[in-house]
Image (cartoon, grey):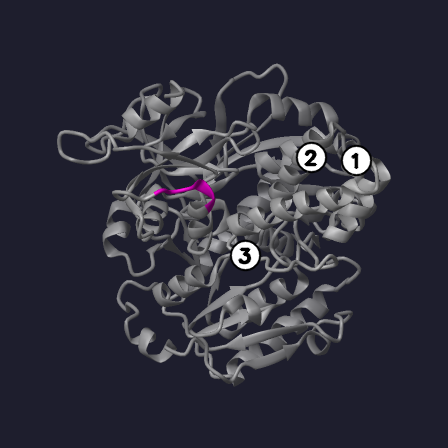
Amino acid sequence: MDGGQRLSFTQLHAAARAVAARVRAAGVLPGDRVGLVCDNSAAFVAAYLGILESGAVVVPVNPSAPPVVLQGAIEDAAMRWLIADDPARLGHGALSSSPVELRLDEILPGSPPSGSLTLVSPSAGAGLAQAAPRASVPDDLQAIVYTGGTTGKPKGVMLTGAALREVAEAGVAMLGLCSSDRVGIITPLHHLYALREVDAALRAGACLMLARTLTFPASVLRQLHDERVTYLSGVPSGFALLVERYSEALSRCRDHLRAVTLGTAPCPPALAAALASLLPRTRVILTYGMTEASRVCYRDVEAPDPRPGSIGRPYPGVELRALDERATPLPPGSHGRIALRTAMAAAGYWNRPEATRDLQLGDGWIQSPDHGYIDEDGYLFLQGRVDDVINSGGEKVSPDEVEAALRGHPQVADCAVLRADDPDGRLGQIVLAVVVPALGAHLAADALTRFCASRLEPYKVPRAFRIVGSLPRTPLGKVDRGRLRAAEDEGT
Amino acid sequence: MPATDFASLETTLREYLERLADSRGKSLPNLGRNEQLVDRGIFDSMSLLDFVVFIEKLFGIKIPGEDVHPENFGSLEAIMRYLQERL
């Protein structure tokens, strides 16, 4: 279901086959990376399934990203093709002049006559493809999903068909999804966090209800209620918005909503309690995962909380360890870096052998970016990230990437980007930029915001700026983010 | 609010929306009153909430969640009409 449009599995499958046929006819070959730049819609799902059916590799891209970010993804993934629901999103310079139009009313019953998907090849595609790696690419590669990491540029997480199947099955098993379920999608499908729920719903034969965005929550909640949605996943900041301003409408879903999951960012206990109170018969489930391993741990919210601060136990088949600095496993209760072994794990990072080596510890184990400990009963307690990555409303932001963008400003002499608490409390953390102007330059926050917004996705643009004379540095000359953060905490 | 004040309200709203557009990498020269702010990439769930909070503080009113729908907040024209009814 996408608004008033309703499709059976047979119709969706036929649409996917039609997309695959058009994609192949346009010259897409198995293994080619095909970017998918679409809002949440039935067309997104049909294109996603069609790309996979064609044997190509799907690369979802944030449709809100500025052209320069899309261009970065095109180059990094050596994309041969792009599919977009709005060609204006693709910019102009980088594309070939002969786009192929897939009319939606020909492939998806109930689509408006004006709707279409555009299939287009980046003009430099052929040259880029030669730069793609070979030996490091798994045979069964199906998707590359970009994620913010410690380094400046987003990394493409390689997911095989086998891993994606495991992810879907783990979701079906954890939720007990079946064909009578109705799965609501309210988060962007270009994230694995939402895409995996599509796979899980299709695997269970459940109905999918797609909401374009949560921009107008009242109409989304009305739709969830009218369609008797049984399962919903979201991010804490989204649920906080629903609880804060739409509690009555959310509460109306209490009779049919049998499970909600919250992930991608820590869930404040007060929010979990508020949800449990508004939805007393609904399983409220906290989840922990990462793009590199998808589903790692979960737990149902209980009152009283038997293990405050825990994010739960691993999904079946997931093994967890806390490691010391030499990567030696620690006994229960000891603090260390969390590592895991799972069939859901990524095959590594696209074209990043060094980052892949850092990720993979051998014998199937991968390391997470998180510190924590595992208690005697196998419950995981997280204690923060080992790196400086900022989690703003569930979106991961690399300070290096934002700093690199800021340094492109001709009047920025130096800068440092760090996390700060969201003063409004909604996003958890926000991106804060501390900027040193060039000699004689006068920098205003508005101008810096505008500059960053032309180079970064909206959630990466700093929400706060501090203009300073100099940055504190360590004896080795690196920016001392710890001192900056301490100064920020003290309000200096 | 006297009718004449709505000219300054429109200016205030335009200034806010232009700043918001800047922060999202969108240019808003001569924003049409009926242009759809979601389609233009200006409003998403968080930026619309920020805008609603801004309006609430500006006028000391509470905007119920049920009022936040495209007919009231989809365009500058819709917002002006809604505020004329509320103020």
CA separation in Å, label 3 and label 2: 27 Å
Q: Nearer the viewer, residue A301 or A75?
A: A75
Residue A248 seen in the figure? yes
Q: Chain of mark 1?
A: A
Of the residues shown, which amino acid type is indicated by label 3? Lys
Could you tell me residue A346's position as x and y percent? 39, 52
Q: Chain of mark 3?
A: B
Could you tell me residue A348's position as x and y percent? 33, 54
Could you tell me residue A446's position as x and y percent? 47, 44
Of the residues shown, which amino acid type is indicated by label 1? Ala
- The magenta stretch is A442-446
Disc 3 marks which residue? Answer: B26
Q: Is residue A128 left or right of residue A8?
A: left
Of the residues shown, which amino acid type is indicated by label 2? Leu
Q: Nearer the viewer, residue A453 or A319?
A: A453
| Disc 3: CA contacts within 10 A as few (<14), some (14-19) or many (>=20) | some
**Which quarter shows the C terminus of chain A?**
top left
Q: Is residue A429 left or right of residue A387?
A: right
Disc 1 marks which residue? Answer: A249
In the picture, the disc for residue A242 is 2
Q: Chain of mark 2?
A: A
Instruction: For the residues labelled 3 and 2, say whether their Cβ atoms are less than 8 Å apart.
Output: no
In the picture, the disc for residue A380 is none
CA separation in Å, label 1 and label 3: 32 Å
**Above or below: residue A160 compared with residue B20:** below
**Which quarter shows the N terminus of chain A?**
bottom right
Magenta span: predominant SS is loop
Instruction: For the residues labelled 2 and 1, say whether their Cβ atoms are less than 8 Å apart.
Output: yes
Dot 1: element: helix
| Residue at image location 73% in from the left, 53% down from the top | B75
Instruction: Give residue A233's quadrant in the image.
Output: top right
Is disc 1 in the same subunit as disc 3? no
